[in-house]
Amino acid sequence: MELPHTPFSRFIERWILRIGEAVSWVWLLLLGIIVLNVVMRYVFSEGRIEFEEIQWHLYSVGFLVGLSYAYSRDAHVRVDVLRERFSDQTRAWIELYGIVLLLLPFIALVIYAAVPFVLSSWASGEVSEAPGGLGYRYLIKATLVLGFLLLLCSTLARLSRVVSYLFGTGED
């Protein structure tokens, strides 16, 4: 099912795709750090907590930004066994209800819970508790809010496309 674009969806999706493509390089960096960490640990018997922590930091950034990118590209997981049996109109209605009743409330709940979490971390200047760990832990925690704000934008763009499809208000 190809949903029509709206001016709003074009604008948002253009930015989401640019951000996603820029951040996608984090996966290559993550791979390099994992290889370096493994070599240091098993060849030189030298474990570094900084490398372990930066791995999960980079994974978090890639995953959280990747959510909005995948949703904009319609590359997220669906239950295709059922979905393919429905008409395009039925799929669009399911998409509409899924966004309004499930995805938007979930995003709102995560942002609502994450903002105080991030603000507390930021106010205390939180750093890793591990000796030799990374500082500025509040920055990685802030990506939780950033990632879900990007997902919210992507979801609203998708919602505008679904509404356009169902009610004929789109450009395409």
Image (cartoon, grey):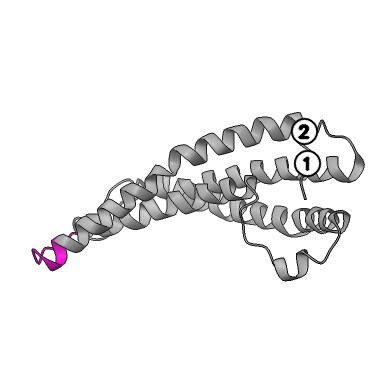
For the record, the magenta segment spans 40-48
Residue 18 in percent (x, y) is at 53, 34
Q: What residue does disc 2 label?
A: 6
Q: Relative to residue 95, is residue 38 drawn left or right?
A: left
| Residue type for callout 2 | Thr
SS majority, magenta: loop
User: What residue sits 50% from the left and 51% below the top?
Assistant: 64
| 129 relative position to 87: left or right | left
Badge 1: few (under 14), some or many (20 or more) residues near its Cα, within 10 Å?
many
Q: Amino acid at mark 1?
A: Arg
Name the residue furthest bottom: 81
**Neighbour class for label 2 at 10 Å: few (<14), some, many (≥20)?**
many
- Please indicate whether residue 165 sits to the left or right of residue 105 in the image: right
At mark 2, the secondary structure is loop
Task: Say whether marks 2 and 1 touch (CB < 8 Å).
Answer: yes
User: Residue 161, which numbered label?
Assistant: 1
Asked whether 168 or 157 is in front, the reply is: 168
User: What residue lies at 91% left-to-right and 42% top-to-bottom?
Assistant: 167
Residue 138: in sight, yes or no?
no
**Label 2 – label 1 distance at C-alpha:** 6 Å
Residue 60 quadrant? bottom left
Quadrant for the C terminus, please.
top right
As drawn, the label of residue 142 is: none
Residue 50 horizontal/vertical position (percent): 23, 55
Which residue is depicted at the point 53% across and 47% down? 147
Residue found at x 39% / y 43%: 25
Q: Is residue 50 magenta?
A: no
